[in-house]
Image (cartoon, rainbow, N blue to C red):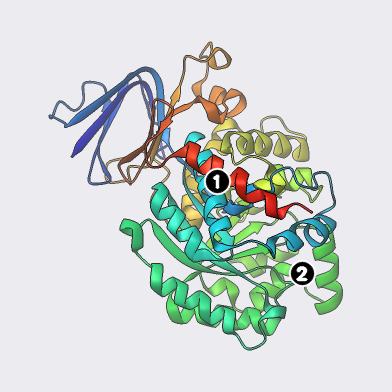
Amino acid sequence: MRYRITAGTVMTLDPAGTIHRPGQVSWENGTIVSVGTAESDRRPVDQTIHVPAGVVMPGFYNGHNHAAMTLFRGLADDSPLFEWLQQHIWPREARLTADDIYAGTMLAAAEMIRSGTVGFADMYFEMDAVAQAVADSGLRGWLARGLIGTQDPDGEKLAESVEFARRWADQADGRIVPMLAPHAPYTCPPPYLAQVAEAARKHNLGIHIHLAESHQELADITRQYGRTPIELASDTGIFRNRTLIAHGVHILESDLPALAGLVGGVIACPVSNAKLASGILPYRLLRDAGVPIGLGTDGAASTNTLDMFQEMKAMAWLQKLRDGQPDGFRAVDALRAATRGTAAVLGFPGGELTTGSPADLIVVDGRQAHLMPEWDVTANLVYAGVGSDVVYTVVAGRILMAEGIIQSFDEQAIMRDVVSRVAHLTD
């Protein structure tokens, strides 16, 4: 079937920053076939959606998530990172079943679809349940089992991760891309990281890892190995694969040689890093060195929401504050990081509305009071927009939400299931 959306504004986010007013986007078989003014394509379609006050734009790619951690939203807020993990999160995670993780991931899927996210990179466990949730929800997923090297002396978990990749590669109409995910350098010693790097090369898999996330990590790794976390990871061969570096707030200028030639990039998680007092990504340092930068939320247990509008605001505010320059980081920089930036880190051709691009797009309702007047649509979206402004979400050409109603699954049933499941996680 061929579909078309006509709207008051179409933001392509192509390299030229083209905006059509009014505009249209048409797609067929999951691929955009036409973008332009409202009159630019008169070919017949099977379904036309008219949103006269809407803003059509690329959907968001959430570059770092632990989706099932929606189950822990609001648990032990305002705690330091390692206290939060060791005393509150990890003990409860030990109680989770695969069904719990499926339910938590579906809850995350509902929140992401509602707030304009079309795909996410996830690191967790019981990943078959996560993959099934991706398949059922209609989202895209770059999925990897979190590996704790200190708990995998014989490499059994690494082998299971490779098997997961074999099972799910190209499943769900190609919407699932498996990866390998060594958790962090403080849980995965260098020989284990080297094992993961070799497995990734052998099986042509990307790598998703937490790196340079906290002051404590930087201090501990440097003291133990005489190398920064980035240098240590580079030494193990991790960066010879496409690598998604989550956080990166403590990347130093001296780390840049280790990042030279990196395939992949860094995913900023500004809300989580601010809330946990971890630090602020050195965006300008990385940008000037040519390191691709995307945007993610981290899990809802630390960031509370999976709303990428919130992440765009936080990234812009914090970069301005870090540099002391209000014009050093612009609204369009945040918008590109949440779309094309993350897609580039993942090696995916999404994040813009151009002919031949994946039909991953959203429609924002421009009739909201907080989005008026429209002096600058980009500034309005980044600095005033919220996830609930999204009224349509389309992934791979499939309409997952129409007029604010999720089409791909029963959202209310998922929420009821989650409420019943969290009872066994309480102390």
Q: Secondary structure at mark 2?
A: loop
Disc 2 target residue: 228
Q: Secondary structure at mark 1?
A: helix
Can the viewer see residue 262?
no
**Residue name at image x 73 percent, y 33 percent:** 325
Q: Are marks 2 and 1 in contact (CB under 8 Å)?
A: no
Distance in Å between CA atoms under marks 2 and 1: 43 Å
Can the viewer see residue 327?
yes
Provide residue 401's location: percent of width, then percent of height: 39, 34
Mark closer to the chain start, 2 or 1: 2
Say which amino acid is labelled 1.
Asp
Provide residue 42's location: percent of width, then percent of height: 15, 25
Disc 1 target residue: 417
Is the residue 395 above or below the residue 166 in the image?
Answer: above
Count the labels in the image: 2
Asked whether, in this view, residue 416 is left or right of residue 78, the answer is: left
Provide residue 187's location: percent of width, then percent of height: 73, 73
**Residue name at image x 23 percent, y 26 percent:** 48
Say which amino acid is labelled 2.
Thr
Mark 2 neighbour class, 10 Å CA radius: few under 14, some 14 to 19, many 20 or more: many
Which quadrant of the rendered structure holds the N terminus? top left
- Tell me which corner region of the image, top left, top right, bottom left or bottom right, holds residue 213: bottom right
Asked whether, in this view, residue 401 is left or right of residue 192, the answer is: left
| Depth check, front residue: 346 or 152 | 152
